[in-house]
Amino acid sequence: MPSKLTLRRQVTLLGISLVILTVACLLAVSLWKTITSHNQQIEQRMISAENVLIEYLTAKEELLLTASKVLTADFGFKQAVASRDQGTIASVLENHGSRINASLMVLSDLNGRVISSNNNKLALGPTLIGNITTLQSKLNNTQLVLINGELHQLIILPVMAPRTIAYSVIGFQIDQPFVNELKRLMAVEVSFFYNDVAIITTLQQKNSVSSPIIDDNIQSINTEKHHTQMVNIEGVDIQSMYFNKMDSAWWLFKRNRYKNKNITFTNAQNHQYIAQISIDLSPSYAALDKLVFITLQISCFIIAITAIACSIIARNLTRPLQQLTELSHEFSQGRYEHTDNMSNGSIEVKRVYDSFIKMGRKIQQRERKINHQAKHDVLTGVYSRATFIDLLEKQILAHTGSEHHSLLVMTINVRNFKRINDSLGSEIGDLTLKAVALRIQGIYQNKIVMVGRFSGDEFCVVMMSSKGDNHQEMLDNFSTFLKTPIQVDKLWLNLNFRIGSCIFPQQSNNAKELVRRTTIALEAARNEGKTNRAYQDGEDEAYLERLHLLEELRDALSSNRGELFMVYQPKLNLNSDKIEKVEALIRWIKPNGQFISPEVFIHLAEQSGLIIKLTHWVIDSVLQQQQDWLANNVKLKVAINISAQDITHTNFIDFIFEKLSEYQVDPNLITLEITERDIMTNEDIVISRLIQLKNAGIQISVDDYGIGQSSLGKLKQLPIDELKIDKTFILELDKSKKDQFIVKSTIELSHQLGFSVVAEGVENRASLEMLKLMRCNHAQGYFISKPIKSAELLIWLNNYE
């Protein structure tokens, strides 16, 4: 589907899209690099914090170990322990605890029961006893132990005197100050967990973690282990050990608030205590958000600048294109004159614009030439037929109602122009037409309005005549000047012309009608053998009637209404007095009963080219009729009339052979009659095709012999079987001696040349008897029988026999 966006919008969108893509890629790379660097820094801080934590606990462990060794090595303390001197033991424990700032100083017996302690809150319960008993398995090593909800780092050393008489337990409580100190040293948040519950964390704001609120929250968390839970301890949100699950909203995404790392410590009781190092990611997020925000601001600014720049560039590009579009539209309207320069645009676009201007000028020149050629005859330079009629119509409109001027329209035909082409060549023929056009334009120069050429040798002229001019005298003078010898390429030619004329407004006020009536007058001059012929009232109506009759004939051939039908005129064999042959003749009776003479509609068919179709219809009808006769044991030879147009048509021979095969008719039963005039029309082609037909068994007859153009020399060369003497010599044969001499000599000559002879137009018995005496072969005429239909012919034949 073609895009509906304008070029300007497409360029703008393309520029913006590229900028957005570039900014997005740069932003993505920048964020990736920033986040990667940030993660590396966080990871490095995690490692450093872990090292600090371990070193800090190791330092505490060494301090506890040193203090424990000092305590257990004290002789007085050993005596007090051995004697169970509670006061001395308590005093020693108190002094040593104060000296190292220990939060827990305990002396237990070998069964884990507390002998003395500096912490009165410690209960001598089974839990404490169990812890001490268990921890005894790892002497000299610090361990993390949860005692009464408080996390301690403890070390146990035996009191030897010299054997083990008791155990000293020294420890530091991991409390809020402890973890705060760790936070200060590590610069990160730190939390301690036991059984997925936060024991102490720097996320709290209170020093005490053993408040009822904390205990309740711890208990609540403890009921659902291994699940991320959020509790609130004295206003501070504390999650279970999965602090990394604390999410903060960021646009449509969620991101972790803390980056965590867990360090696991396992004591003698296989209890695991986890120290979780947490780095608050909020500052990093804030910096990242600020970077994204600034980047987006810069991106939006760049996109806006790009949009403005692309819009300006696109406008500078599309404005010249718009000018080119408008220029093309002007060209399409036929307006090629443009002197304006392009207002703006690149050098290339201006070159395109200049090319358009040059192209328009060339198109204009070519169009003028084409228009001139369309309106004028290419050879002679005078007007073409269509232009001539249009201009004549304008002249008629200009002079309508004028009482002082009229128009004399003439159609001029160069007689026998074909002979000039054939004898002198087409080049001389073209020069002759040019000379004729110049001669026509040179006669009555002050009166000639326009000259046109309608066909190869036909011109049309319009002359202005004033009131009182004698049109016939003008026509005669024009003809006199026109037929004077004309020089063509050093040759002087005597040309003959025929002229048909018509006058506006006396005889017509329509251009096409005026021209048509001049051609009617020209055709009448040709038929009457005249040089000049003026149109006579009523001839156009007769011409239109003939055209209408031609259309009716065309319709009759296409339909099967029975308007056209065949009749057959018997031919009498004068030697045997038998009917062996018939002549097929076409008849036309219109549905209203009007009989149309064959001479009329056959002549129209020959003039219009419809004779080919008419002859094909006749041949098909006759051969079909012969098929029926043969089926009824009637064997008659049939003569069919053909014209020069028929015999010269490309598929005429094939058509006859095809129909003979279709109806299974013997070619010897067919005779084709053609006139002398038609044979001489295109002699070579006609003779060659007649020979082809004759070789196939079809007989050839020369019709209307005696009134044509053939000579005796030509006659002996023709491939014919029969001569048919024209009826003009037979109609009054019994009365005219001259006709008798002509007919007798023709019959004798034909017999000597090997032709049979048919005499048509026998109207009485006397003529028939004379033909018998002259040894004529066949005769036909109304005396024997008029042309009749097939059914009547069969009856007539039975009666005749």
Image (cartoon, grey):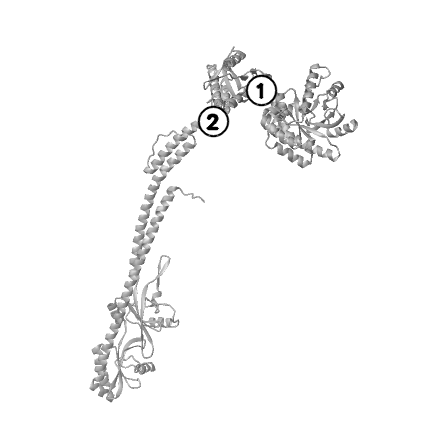
Q: Which residue is denoted by mark 1 in the rendering? A: 523
Percent position of residue 573, x then y: 74, 25
Q: What residue do we see at 34% from left, 37% from top?
A: 349
Q: Could you tell me which quadrant the C terminus lies in?
A: top right
The answer to whether residue 524 is seen in the rendering is yes
Q: Quadrant of residue 689?
A: top right
- Residue sitting nearer the eye, 745 or 251: 745
**Real-space Cα distance between discs 2 and 1?**
28 Å
Residue 568 vertical placement versus 283 (above, below)? above
| Left-right relation of 564 to 465 | right
The mark total stands at 2
| Left-right relation of 613 to 246 | right
Q: Quadrant of residue 502?
A: top right
Residue 142 vertical placement versus 787 (above, below)? below
Q: Which residue is denoted by mark 2 in the rendering? A: 374
Q: Secondary structure at mark 2?
A: helix
| Left-right relation of 793 to 212 | right
Q: Secondary structure at mark 1?
A: helix
- Residue sitting nearer the eye, 341 or 533: 533
| Left-right relation of 672 to 69 | right
The answer to whether residue 511 is seen in the rendering is no
- Residue sitting nearer the eye, 619 or 574: 574
- Residue sitting nearer the eye, 792 or 712: 712
Q: What residue do we see at 30% from left, 67% from top?
A: 278
Q: Amino acid at mark 1?
A: Glu
Q: Residues within 10 Å of mark 1 (few under 14, many from 20)?
A: some
Residue extending farthest to the front is: 752
Earlier-in-chain disc, 2 versus 1: 2
Percent position of residue 347, x then y: 32, 37
